[in-house]
Amino acid sequence: MPTPLGSKREESGERPTSGSPNFHHGFFYLIGCGPNGPQTATLQALETIQRMDAVLAPARQARLFADYIGDTPVAFDPWAGFWDYQGKPFNTLTPEETELFRQNRTGLLEQRMEEIRAMLDKGLDVGLLEFGNPCLFGPGQSYAERLRPQEVIIIPGMGADAAAMAAVGASILPAHQARFLLQTAPFMLTGQGLSPDMSLEEPSPEAQEFLSLLAKQQHSAIFYMALTDAPRLFEMLGRDLPGDLPCAAVYWAGDPERQRVVRGVLEDMPAKLKDDPERFMGLLLAGRFLEGQPFTTAHDRSPAMAEATQKKN
């Protein structure tokens, strides 16, 4: 797809690119910036940031990408008020505060969308700096989905899953006898949705049946937002999965200063994570691929290799 032109490029004398639905109208860029700073961002992401007329970013990202943002104005922090209410994290709110939090969040989103549309109508390109992969649990879609598809351009980015896999040093597929890779969040797996305090409820009979059927098929798994209620998660998984299933919790994947890995098996992970203060910035990986050399194992077990070995002998 041709890259649409914003006012910075128009001022430089470049002609509008054919294929732009309206070159006098700005575009909203959802920019995947990777799990940390510029070192885990793509060149496409960095070049896109430099071309923006306005940037939406929290303070940490604005600081990490300051060299690329330059003197471009940071219009606002798109996540201010999205995860807290009057300074209190949303998972600590009372039921009454939770309702006020929802109303406040809805109002903030509407107000900010008005600001974004006003900038686009002026022909300005607006870039929202999204951590990780903007199309995998990326909250930036909260804004993008309220615009017309032809107004939105998504710049792909490396997700925390890629950084976590590099941290454990293992290929997740093919992995021994695993048939597929599952990427989900516990509250989606159980079908309950995200609760205000991010706790996990007892699965319904239908959800438990699904979990039992899932466990019968060997697979590898990456769980997002999995450690907020780790004891309940491991208890639920342990009902059907073997206790010796290898697991790894990767905290702050991709951050060279804070990244760390806790390894174990399903039955001993609760004890290993019990006293860890971090409950949000962690991914849980589970599967036989963590035993080591999954690609070599799959290669050696393939029918083609077995046939070649027989012919050779």
Image (cartoon, grey):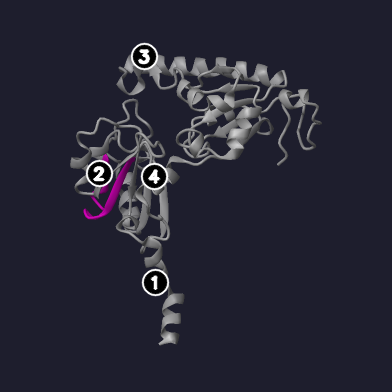
Is there a contact, CB below 8 Å, between mark 4 and mark 3? no
- Classify mark 4: helix, strand or loop: helix
Of labels 2 and 4, the one closer to you: 4
On the image, numbered disc 3 is attached to which residue? Answer: 87
Residue 247: give its label: none
- Classify mark 1: helix, strand or loop: helix
Q: CA distance from mark 1 to mark 2?
A: 32 Å
Residue 234: give its label: 2
Q: Which residues are magenta?
A: 233-250
Seen at 47% across and 20% down, the residue is 59
Of labels 3 and 1, the one closer to you: 1
- Which of disc 4 and disc 1 is earlier in sequence? 4
- Which of disc 4 and disc 2 is earlier in sequence? 4
- Classify mark 2: helix, strand or loop: helix
Seen at 57% across and 17% down, the residue is 75
Crowding at dot 4, Cα within 10 Å, few <14 / some 14-19 / many 20+, comes out as many
Is there a contact, CB below 8 Å, between mark 1 and mark 2? no
Between 32 and 81, the one nearer to me in the picture: 32
- Which of disc 2 and disc 3 is earlier in sequence? 3
On the image, numbered disc 4 is attached to which residue? Answer: 164
Q: Amino acid at mark 1?
A: Asp
Q: Amino acid at mark 3?
A: Gly
Crowding at dot 2, Cα within 10 Å, few <14 / some 14-19 / many 20+, comes out as some
- Which of disc 1 and disc 3 is earlier in sequence? 3
Q: Amino acid at mark 4?
A: Ala
- Which of disc 2 and disc 1 is earlier in sequence? 2
Residue 300: give its label: 1
In the rendered image, residue 222, in percent from the top left (x then y), is placed at: 38, 46
Between 70 and 254, the one nearer to me in the picture: 70
Seen at 59% across and 39% down, the residue is 43
Q: Amino acid at mark 2?
A: Phe
Q: CA distance from mark 2 to mark 4?
A: 20 Å
